[in-house]
Image: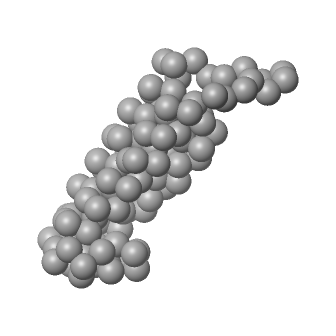
Amino acid sequence: MLEKRAGKSSPRTGVMTLLLIQFGLLQAVDIFSTLLFPAVGLREANPLIHWLAGVTGSPAGGLLLAKAAGAAVAFYCWRTKRARVLRRANVFYACVAAWNLCAILLKTAAG
């Protein structure tokens, strides 16, 4: 059982649910943008995803395996009301998604 810390209130369920939904949407943008990389002539730069793609036999398989692990951690954070961790993960994945989309736009603009 989790104890409340003195002076700290736990986040409302609605806030936690919105953070989890945001996490899921950012993961979807990351998946779709990463899967678009080969079509525009880019390759995955994350060595873990690259290795998992080799293990599973496909880039999509490796990416989905990593995303499943991340989703499990996000769900745990949601259940235990760790809003700060989910917020930080969302900021990180927003940056990753922006990076991926910029890379795709720059590569397609360059020809």
Residue 39: x and y in percent read 15, 71
Quadrant of the image for the N terminus? top right
Q: How many marks?
A: 0
Residue at 26 percent across and 59 percent down: it is 64
**Residue 89 relative to residue 39: left or right:** right
* Depth order, front residue of 93/9: 9
- Tell me residue 4's x, y (percent): 74, 24
The percent position of residue 44, horizontal first and vertical second, equals 32, 75
In which quadrant of the rendered image does the C terminus lie?
bottom left
Give me the residue at 84% from left, 23% from top. Answer: 6
Residue 46: tell me if it is visible. yes
Question: Which residue is pictured at 49% across the width and 32% down the height?
Answer: 79
Q: Judge by depth and name the residue closer to the eye, 103 or 93.
A: 93
To which quarter of the image does residue 86 belong? top right
Residue 12 against residue 33 in the figure, above or below: above
Outermost residue to the right: 6
Answer with left or right where residue 31 lies relative to residue 87.
Answer: left
- The image quarter in which residue 23 lies: top left
Q: Whole-percent x and y of residue 90?
A: 50, 45
State whether residue 36 is above or below residue 13. below
Q: Is residue 42 visible?
A: no
Indicate the colouring scheme: one colour
